[in-house]
Image (cartoon, rainbow, N blue to C red):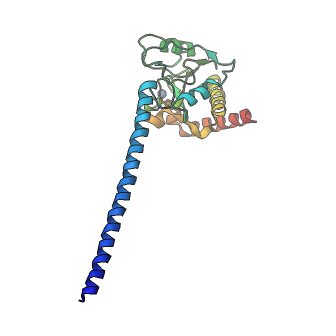
Amino acid sequence: MSEGNYSARRVYYERRRRRKIIFRRIICFVLFVGIITGVSIGGVKLYRRLVNGSGDTTAVTEKLKAIEIPDWIDEQLIYVHNTARTGAALDGVKNIVIHYVGNPGTSAQNNRDYYNKPTTEVSSHFLVGLEGEIIQCVPLWEKSAASNWRNNDTISIEVCHPDETGQFNDASYSSAVRLTAWLLNELGLDESDVIRHYDITEKLCPLYYVEHEDAWEQLKKDIGTKLNEYSK
Ligand SMILES: [Zn+2]
């Protein structure tokens, strides 16, 4: 190997080495900036969560507060207590969750008064009664205590039923359809966003509509039909 050839290769390897070093530095810099940005954003989110009890809910709260409650809904908000009504804001509304009260023959008022007891830890946004009456128990922008780990992004509806089967009667059925469709329309959702408590936890709730899949599909269909009336 000649002397000239040797030094040319040295220069070549030296350049390659330097390029590698520069390349590594760029990668390190990009990673560094990425990590710092990530940590900062995470920190801000965590701070908000600690201060507000949830993420950035201000916009969500404002949107939900702007919804006017119609006069066919009887507003009887329970007082802030226990886990039944913590006063914490919803993070958003992704689904409407249908429940049954599980206590045959009880009225919407009975259940609302039960939520309002100092020791009660559960609640729902709405109760639909045996005569089709609808009581609101928790404001739309606040979390209710009905749907386990989905309380943060769902609106809950508990429906009364005359017997152990859990099947809604005609009056409670049509009010549940009316209320759900109204909510969907106000929230810009559709009937595919209506779920059962069962779909979250596999709890047999609402019992009849878990045991009868066809009845559940029909209920959603009826909600969709009603929704079309609202959105016209
Ligand atoms: Zn339930």
- Where residue 153 appears, as percent x and y from the top left, is 51, 32
Q: Is residue 113 visible?
A: yes
- Where residue 61 appears, as percent x and y from the top left, is 57, 26
- Where residue 175 appears, as percent x and y from the top left, is 64, 25
Q: Is residue 175 above or below residue 35?
A: above
Q: Relative to residue 179, is residue 199 drawn left or right?
A: left
In the picture, the quarter occupied by the N terminus is: bottom left
Q: Quadrant of residue 27?
A: bottom left
Q: Relative to residue 188, is residue 204 drawn left or right?
A: left
Q: Nearer the viewer, residue 75 or 194?
A: 75
Residue found at the very far front of the displayed protein: 4
Q: Quadrant of residue 81?
A: top left
Q: Relative to residue 80, is residue 74 drawn left or right?
A: right
Residue found at the very far right of the displayed protein: 232
Q: Is residue 167 above or below residue 114?
A: below
Q: Name which residue lies at 47% across and 25% down.
A: 146
Q: Name which residue lies at 42% across and 16% down.
A: 82
Q: Nearer the viewer, residue 146 or 100?
A: 146
Residue found at the very far bottom of the displayed protein: 2
Q: Nearer the viewer, residue 160 or 146?
A: 146
- Where residue 144 appears, as percent x and y from the top left, is 50, 23
Q: Is residue 199 above or below residue 112?
A: below
Q: Is residue 203 visible?
A: no
In the picture, the quarter occupied by the C terminus is: top right
